[in-house]
Amino acid sequence: MSAPSPQDSTARAEARLEGDCLHVAVGGRWHITQSRPDWQATIAGAVGETGYNPLRVRLFMAEDLAAWDSALVLFVGEGLRWSRAHDSFCDLSALPQPVRQLADQLTGATEQVDAPPHQPAQNFLAMVGHAATDIWQKAGEIAAFVGECALGAAHVARAPRKFRWQDCFDEMQQCGAMALPIVGLISFLVGVTLAYTGAIVLRQYGGDVYLADLIGLAMVREMGAVMTAVVLAGRTGAAFAATLGNMRANEEIDALTTFGIRPVDFLVLPRVVALGLMTPLLALYANALGIIGGMAVAYGLLHISPSAYWNEMLQIVTQRAVNVGLIKATAFGLIVGLSGCLRGLEAERSAAGVGRAATSAVVTALLLLIIADAFFAVLFNALGW
């Protein structure tokens, strides 16, 4: 076998202008450790002297292209950036698929870093249009992520053995048992606050005993599920976003994708399932603590015995009311889990990006919780629940 000639062992690029199309051929061996052609120097003879900007740039492989690595990707990336700067269409269809993909990623990352800060539009209608477009885009991202999670759940239903049960149990402990103290304290104080507020009105009409109805119904139908979800959004949702964001910054998620493992199945589903299962249980715990807080105020302020308070509360708190709260709590848990995981997977690859992802996860979860709560209010009212 003969040794390669010096011409074949070095990277080579040749450019020629035909009409409004600039043809650039690459050949030889492209290695990052060796010298490689420069894009400006390559096209200088064909374009630089005339100052003509071609409408189309076509890159293709010469017959003697023997090997390539990131050196060729850098050259093609320079060509893409030059073409976009001169409003020329760059045709890469003749290059290998990996080269095209890597060059597009390199160019996109460079443009994102070098992009100037966005200047807010001065026109009010333009600002409204940009905001509406941004909301529509974010809604599409959320819908796509929910769809991926639904497909992952279908895969798990068909093959339960592939689900990471140990990770799910660990997350259930973290977001369930470890959250009992803070959820219990906040729920007890919410019950106390509602009791003091309700007593101001009820004492004026001699309806002190109906304070039990107010506290019981408010906690079971609304406040138990909502306050539990709010606590989990700030405690667990932010933790999910920070964990996945840090994994993204360390390229661990990219490694999973390289090995053919879907991050949604490996990282997202165990967390979402754990939160969806534990939130209703925490809501029941919050209901009990809130009712006890109202009972303490009723006994100390209105001199209502615990037995009278309990009997009166049972007159209005039915199993249907408890079911309403559990349905809300389950939906709220899924919303918090999905919001945290979504923002974590979208986090920027930096420490600041991880912090912004955690903040965005809390804001997104709270916004979706309010929207879902309003939807459930209208739905249950229409159903007569």
Image: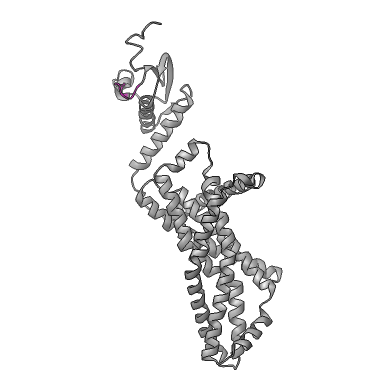
Q: Residue furthest top?
A: 2
Query: Could you tell me which quadrant the N terminus lies in?
Result: top left
Whether residue 139 is visible to the viewer of this picture, yes or no, is no
Name which residue lies at 51% across and 68% down: 180
Q: Nearer the viewer, residue 168 or 91?
A: 168
Q: Nearer the viewer, residue 57 or 308?
A: 308
Q: Main secondary structure of the magenta part?
A: loop
Give the quarter of the image for residue 65: top left
Horizontal side, residue 183 vs residue 88: left or right: right
Query: Could you tell me which quadrant the C terminus lies in?
Result: bottom right
| Residues rendered magenta in the picture | 31-38
Which percent across, then down, holds residue 174? 49, 60
Which percent across, then down, holds residue 295? 56, 84
Which percent across, then down, holds residue 340? 49, 55
Membership of 34 in magenta stretch: yes
Whether residue 299 is visible to the viewer of this picture, yes or no, is yes
Name which residue lies at 55% across and 53% down: 168
Vertical placement of residue 303 versus 124, above or below: below
Name which residue lies at 59% across and 70% down: 284
Q: Residue furthest front?
A: 166
Name which residue lies at 37% across and 27% down: 70
Q: Nearer the viewer, residue 179 or 359?
A: 179
Vertical placement of residue 174 versus 315, above or below: above
Which percent across, then down, holds residue 217? 62, 77
Horizontal side, residue 368 vs residue 316: left or right: left
Membership of 252 in magenta stretch: no
Q: Nearer the viewer, residue 384 or 214?
A: 214
